Amino acid sequence: MGIFLAPTTSAALARLAELDGDTGSAPLERLRAIRALLVALDTDPASLAGVRAAREQGASWEQVADAAGLKPAAAKWRWQGSDAEIAARQDAGRKRAARPSSVPTDLPGLSVAEAAAQLGITPQAVYLQVSRGRLASRTVELPDGRSYKRVFPGEPPQATPHNHQDDGVRHD
């Protein structure tokens, strides 16, 4: 199809062009073809070759980033350095992305976000209801010093000096 795209990218482009000319193509098939082309283009060696050629001709990282629709730092992260350096950065990024969350999953109650979703309100409204004594909450502290606000929608709130319920007595 072309002279600089990888064969897999050319095939994805040809498939999308074929579906574009077919008025009876299925919408999900078109969507899959669009996504396949985007993935192929994002990993196509032609991008790196184009960046390297542009830089050799004097293009700045700002110009490269603008042409790619990226910020200069993102363009440098993606394309600066040797093939080995780029591959090492990408591998490190994949490893970071694969790490599990450091938030424990066995905490009691609900997180503020979970409580908000369950109650059909915003997280800010959860905090407001806690401060007004309408929702029970506790701060759970872990042995390593991390602490998490947990909400207990089914429990009655405990009265505290800052969270007292109106008992009809004036507190001056």
Image (cartoon, helix red, strand yellow):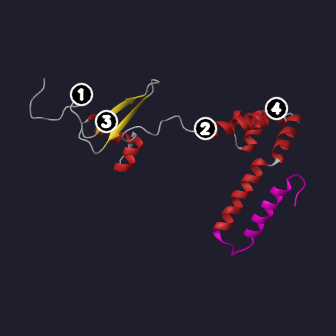
Q: Amino acid at mark 4?
A: Gly
Q: Amino acid at mark 3?
A: Ser
N-terminal of the two: label 3 or label 1? 3
In 3D space, how far apart are the residues under numbered discs 2 and 1 (Cα atoms)?
A: 39 Å
Q: Which residue is mark 3?
A: 137
Read off the magenta span.
1-27
- Image marks 3 and 2: residues in contact by CB distance under 8 Å: no
Q: Quadrant of the C terminus?
A: top left
Label for residue 99? Answer: 2
In 3D space, how far apart are the residues under numbered discs 3 and 2 (Cα atoms)?
A: 29 Å
Q: Amino acid at mark 1?
A: His
* Residue closest to the eye, 103 or 43: 103
For label 2, the SS is loop
Residue 157 is situated, as x and y percent measured from the top left of the image, at 24, 37
For label 1, the SS is loop
In 3D space, how far apart are the residues under numbered discs 4 and 2 (Cα atoms)?
A: 26 Å
N-terminal of the two: label 2 or label 1? 2
Q: Which residue is mark 1?
A: 162
For label 3, the SS is strand
**Along the horizontal axis of the image, is 132 left or right of 114?**
left
